[in-house]
Image (cartoon, rainbow, N blue to C red):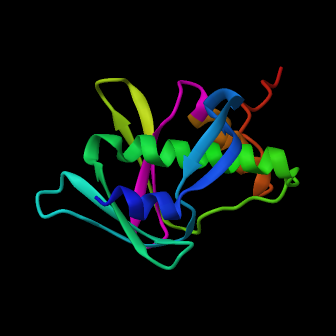
Amino acid sequence: MNPTYYQRTLVHYDTILLMGYRKMTNILAIPINEISGAMVTEDGQKMLLKFVQANGNDLILAIPRDQFLNFVDMAALSQKQSDDILKIDPNIKSAFHVKWWELGFDKTTKTAVLTLTFGAGGKLSFRLSENMPKDILETLQAYVGNTVPQKPDVLN
């Protein structure tokens, strides 16, 4: 890595918000215009994430497999923080088009697991808290106009 090359492409940011909205100052960063591709290494242990820098040069990062979900979590948090700063209407959602879903049960944790397939075919799985499946069912039934089945009144 040639340090002088990166010195020419770094941009100074006075303030950056981190997790929990904690502010950091005096940050140098490489401006990115686009995420142009991704693939995994042959051994499956790294994601090679390709960026196009503001100066037009490519930059490829190798992200370890055990950091994939952390990367997704940080991207989602950044989207939320950006929406808050820009005062984006909370009713307007940036959302993936879900192509398929699977619902399973993790016997070890005794929780439901919802897996969504989206975008280019990626999948994300979410472990649902104890009451969440019931709450989702009730919400969906209200959405489609059906009510939750009630026990019939006992006739005297």
Residue lying at the far top in this picture: please name it. 156
- Residue 79: image location, x then y, percent: 67, 51
Q: Nearer the viewer, residue 6 or 109?
A: 6
**Residue 80 position by quadrant:** top right
Residue at 31 percent across and 60 percent down: it is 2
Q: Nearer the viewer, residue 95 or 148?
A: 95
Residue 124 inside the magenta-drawn segment: yes
**Residue 77 position by quadrant:** top right
Left/right placement of residue 93 relative to residue 41 reads right
Residue at 11 percent across and 57 percent down: it is 43
Left/right placement of residue 146 relative to residue 136 reads right
Whether residue 114 can be seen here: no
Residue at 63 percent across and 46 percent down: it is 78
Residue at 74 percent across and 34 percent down: it is 150
Q: Nearer the viewer, residue 91 or 60?
A: 60
- Residue 47: image location, x then y, percent: 29, 58
Whether residue 14 can be seen here: yes
Q: For the magenta stretch, what is the residue range?
A: 115-132
- Residue 126: image location, x then y, percent: 47, 41
